[in-house]
Image (cartoon, grey):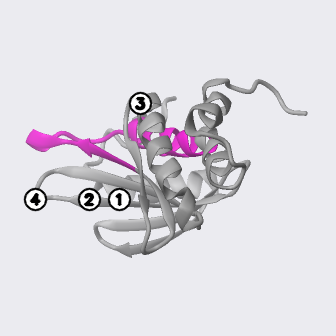
Amino acid sequence: MAVSEAFLSEDLHPIDIVEHLAEHHDWDFDRIGEDQIAMAVEGQWRTYSITLAWSGYDETLRLICTFEMEPPDDRLPALYEGLNRANDQCWAGGFSYWGDQKLMVYKYGLVLSGGQIAVPEQIDTMIGAAVMASERLYPAFQLMVWGGQTPAEAMQIAISEAYGTA
């Protein structure tokens, strides 16, 4: 039985679905309000802070996945160039850097206009894509900021996908 089949008989709020997914995956989460949830998802490189918020006004489920990054000021131009290169590799969503908060941010919005409903598989895929993009690009961002590599050199790490584990 698909995950969504359990929800078909109910008209659940998108954040209720996210809460059920967080429980299913055993992620730490905090329901901030009726329209927002925050959780921690463990990756290979680090733990990612993920927040999903529902906006009934524009019927959009917004995802923000963050991780800390404190680049030296002289490496910011390389990081910004790297962000452009990284976003060229992202089909859905994209990265930005919030300097005041010292956070790398992956953002995505799922538009559900006209009363459409999100199914759990969509939301699970959304969260998985955010973590996968962050995991894939984290080493490249580190090489740009701390490894002294050019964005083009560092992105070669992200372009090659690793298979298996050592």
At 38% across and 53% down in the image, what residue appears? Answer: 63
Residue topped by disc 1: 15
Mark 3 or 4, which is nearer the eye? Answer: 3
Mark pair 3, 4: CA separation: 30 Å
| In-front residue for pair 94/10 | 94
- Tag 1 and tag 2, C-beta contact below 8 Å: yes
At 42% across and 74% down in the image, what residue appears? Answer: 100
Residue at disc 4, secondary structure: loop
Mark seen at residue 88: 3
Query: Which mark sits nearer the N-terminus, 1 or 2?
Result: 1
Q: Is residue 91 depicted above or below 32 in this figure?
A: above
Whether residue 55 is visible here, answered yes or no, is yes
Q: Quadrant of the C terminus?
A: top right
Mark 2 or 3, which is nearer the eye? Answer: 3
Secondary structure mainly formed by the magenta segment: helix
| In-front residue for pair 101/13 | 101
Residue topped by disc 2: 54
Mark 1 or 2, which is nearer the eye? Answer: 2
Query: Which mark sits nearer the N-terminus, 2 or 3?
Result: 2
Label 1 environment density (alpha carbons within 10 Å; few <14, some 14–19, many ≥20): many
The boundaries of the magenta stretch are 107-135
Q: Position of residue 161 (x, y in %)?
A: 68, 25
Residue topped by disc 4: 57
